[in-house]
Image: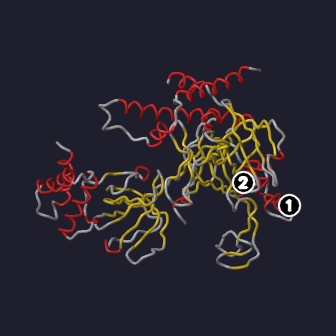
Amino acid sequence: MSQAQLTREVARRVFASEFNDSTYTFKESDDERAPNYALLPTGDRANRVFVVGTLTETEDVGDESEYWRGRVVDPTGTFFVYAGQYQPEAASVLRETEPPAYVAVVGKPRTYEPEEGTINVSVRPETIAVVDDATRDRWVVETAERTLERIEAFEEWEAEQADPEGASTASSNEYALMARERYDSPVENYRRDVIQALESLEETEATP
Amino acid sequence: MSDVRQHAEDIHEQFSDHLDVDVEDVEGRLTTLVDEYKVPIDEARRSVTNHYLDEAGLERDDLAGSASQEASVEDVDEPEQWIDLTAKVIELWEPRSDSIAQVGLLGDPTGTIKFTKWAKSDLPALEEGGVYRLRNVVTDEYQGRYSVKLNSTTVIEELDEDLEVGNDTSEVEGALVDMQSGSGLIKRCPHEDCTRVLQNGRCSEHGEVEGEFDLRIKGVVDDGIDAHEVIFDKEATEALTGISLEEAKEMAMDALDTTVVADEIAEKILGTYYRIEGPTFGRYVLADDVEELDGPVDAEELLIKARSM
């Protein structure tokens, strides 16, 4: 067994707004079976994600065989989840679940280019399960926490880069560097999304 | 005092009984590696130590090192440390090679750790259940797991007392993101001492057998930083899913298919957050204590942090 099979890729926590901006994908070796990663703009790589949100719409968009598209909404935006004949379990959940419903999706980021210059990011699900509102709220808080941790690491690295004194001792942050080279949007945007997501929880708590 | 000088003195100390060498010579060798060849100090130290080992005709295990320290099993988190342990021999295993005199598991109130005793060290035999004070054992690491090695400088003293042994438990918290194959209603080989899971009615050791039904879950609990593999045995699976072994058998019988049980379990647990506590077994955590995290969460503290960043 290869090393890659021994270490399972972790499922990153990322809000929809950041996920949909993760348009750059890469591999870390020339091996054909090497894992594919999406580059998160806050400076990390994601081979797998775990998202929980509201399934608001499902549609079979396939021509000859079934190909289900689900819209999964979190406080910052919408994840597009596509499942076809090679994801039979996930496809059947999309077929049989009546929206709206809270769902937890484990899957791989995939990119496609519907037209020149536009790259869409979607989730190819491994599993989809119907969950409750407590799970959804827990995910929002957890994802906010993980996102803030990435932003903190990114900003620390940026500060070290900017300081000529510290340049020689600066820690390396490979994916922050890659994100700054590949993306335009500042990480500050994602901090604002985190605040918005957390505020949306506070509001629901306030309503009796 | 410079770093290199300190390392040189440490090395010199280690060899003082074996070689007639002065500190300047050691320091010179280290300096060459570090300054001229840009070798990291740890690697340089290793290389210079090896040089003197060769010169003295010694093995690494023969070095007494700088004074070893009294330690507990849970303190072991670095290889090549010289420590003194007071521990109980929990189990002795069959050595796989002639170079090993004894191998097994030691325990103290803080946990358990594997030990190896080399044949060439010529030490007295340890007995299962015995409590010993072991002076001058050296720690080792293989794929993230630690062990201790008894060597020719180790002093073994048998103690006339009992020692309570603690569990090596870990706690993982996160979402259950995957259920692996071999979960749900399975069949095990009925042969005595063989509990292998059957594949298509066959045991890899005993061939085609009439299997015995069992329930288990091999799951992955992921917190967004690490993925942990967790095993739920029959009791834990029954408690987690509310499906008893008898009910699972009935479900399979009705459907003429055992996979319906795994499907039903997956539906109940996938995507749910748990806190799981239990002993670790290789790369698995055995779920002894399982709590579903379905209480309210506090966003306030995080919101303050996010706003102040």
What's the distance in space between the residues labelled 2 and 1, CA to CA?
16 Å
Compared to A141, does A88 lie above or below? below
> What label sits on residue B237 in the rendered view?
2
Compared to A30, does B99 lie above or below? below
Give coordinates of residue B14: x percent, y percent: 20, 58
User: Which residue is situated farthest in the front direction here?
Assistant: A116
The kind of residue on which mark 1 rests is: Glu
Query: Callout 2: helix, strand or loop?
Result: helix
Q: Which residue is mark 1?
A: B250
Give coordinates of residue A130: x percent, y percent: 77, 43
The kind of residue on which mark 2 rests is: Thr
Q: Is residue A22 left or right of residue A28?
A: right
Query: Callout 1: helix, strand or loop?
Result: helix
- Chain letter for mark 2: B
Figure coloring: secondary structure
Residue depicted at 21% across the width and 45% down the height: B3
Q: Is residue B29 left or right of residue B255?
A: left
